[in-house]
Each structure stands twice: as structure tokens, then as C-alpha cells.
Amino acid sequence: MHIPDAFIPINQGVVYWIIALVFVALALRWAKTELTEEKIPLVAVLAAGIFAIMAFNLPVTMGTSGHLLGGALAAILLGSPFAAVFILSMVLIVQGVIFGDGGITTMGANIINMGVIGGFVGYYSFHGLMGVTRNFNLSAFIAAWLACFIPALACALEMFVAGTFPLVPGMIAMGTYHAAIGLIEGAITVVALHLVMNARPDIVVTQQGVPVHG
């Protein structure tokens, strides 16, 4: 899902960068107010884990890639979609600048897709589903699946707007790959949530009405 340089015209890349920077600024404000000393190790572990799972890229037919994201996990554990924006932005900057995974001019779009859309979809889907199902595991699984699938469709839409590849084949390619990848993401998210909540329930942010265990 990392969009390389030249896949998006510079003028469109600038627009995505501006939007991304707004959310990054809000994420930094979240970190300043909510990121306590006790939570810093959790953020570091999440960043390292997300970096690792995103490193396993599967090529998608039209030149981009498919992989796990981790946005829902970060947002649910830390109790805010801005946590996902914060962590994913750091990961994407390191990947793009140091490892060349994703472009610099397109990094704004990558942050929007994986950090903003992934984080917000994962967080609000989880809490919305919890209100309906009252089932922690099911809610987390579906939220993580959506947080993988919907950013993939957003990426395909951006590629269409950029003129890189046609809309329907792009949606099918990205959607099919990430619908399958999302199943793995959902399972990993549920397991990771329980592992962290069992090990350090004191540093996990939960919302009223959302149980720590399913």
C-alpha cells in the first residue's frame, strides 16, 4: 500500500501532504497531552511491531503493494485514532526516508491512507461495533479488517485520480488483496490486544463500557 514517488503528480502530492500535516499536528498534540511516561514503552513496542509487519510486502498487480497495517491495534490500545496517526507517521517516515519504502512526494497520501483512515476507521468501527455486539473479540477483528480494507480502496481511488491506473481494476486488485490480508490483520489484532491487556492492563486506555477482556 506504500505509494512510490511518481505514482501521484506533484500538485496532488502537495495536497495530500497538507492534509496529512494537519493530522500529524493533531497527533503531536495528542502525544503531548496523553503520552505519559508509562505509555512510552507501549508506543515504542507498537511502532517496532508495526514496522516489522509492514515490512512483509506482497506485490499487487499494478505496481503497489499489500501488507498488514496495525492502525486499529494502536488506536484501540491507546484509546485514540490520533495514536495511530502518531505511530504510523513515524513508521512511514523511517520507511520512506531510510529504506525507500514509499515515496517522499507521496508520503502525505501514505500517512492519510494508513495512519489517518486506518486509525479512524479502526477506532470508531471498534467502538461502534462494541455498542451493538458487546463482543470484544468480534468487534476488534472486524474493526481491524475494515482498517486494512478501506485504506486499500482509498489508495486505489487516489491512483485513479492521479491517472496511474483505472478505477475498477484498481479497486478489485487492492480490495481483493487487502480483504484477504485483513483477515490476518484481524486475528493478529485480537491476539495482540489480549496479550498487552493481560501483561499491562494499567497502561491500556479503555473507554467506558468497553471491557478489557472479551
Image: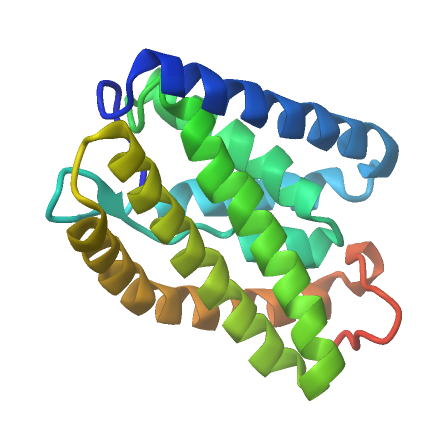
Query: Which residue does the image show at 84% across and 39% down from the upper left?
Result: 34
Picture residue at 45% right of the left edge, 73% below the top:
187
Of 165 and 134, the residue lying toward us? 165
Q: Residue at x 38, y 27 (%)?
A: 95
Residue 27 x %, y %: 70, 32
Q: Nearer the viewer, residue 166 or 126?
A: 166
| Numbered-mark total | 0
- Residue 54: x and y in percent read 36, 45
- Examine the image and state in which quarter residue 155 appears: top left
Q: Residue 52 is drawn in which quadrant? A: top left
Whether residue 57 can be seen here: no
Q: Residue 57 in the image: x percent, y percent?
A: 24, 46
Q: Indicate left or right for 32 with 58 as reference.
A: right
Q: Position of residue 185 (x, y in %)?
A: 42, 64
The image shows residue 25, relative to residue 202, as above or below, that is above
Which quadrant of the structure image shows residue 3? Answer: top left
Q: Is residue 119 left or right of residue 9?
A: right
Residue sitting nearer the eye, 46 or 211: 211
Q: Which residue extends farthest left?
A: 61
The answer to whether residue 32 shows anywhere in this view is: yes
**Direction from residue 45 to residue 163 in the image, left or right:** left
At x 66%, y 79%, the residue is: 136
Point out the image quarter for the C terminus.
Answer: bottom right
Image height check: is 134 above or below 145? below
The colour mode here is rainbow
Q: Which quarter of the rendered picture does the N terminus lie within?
A: top left
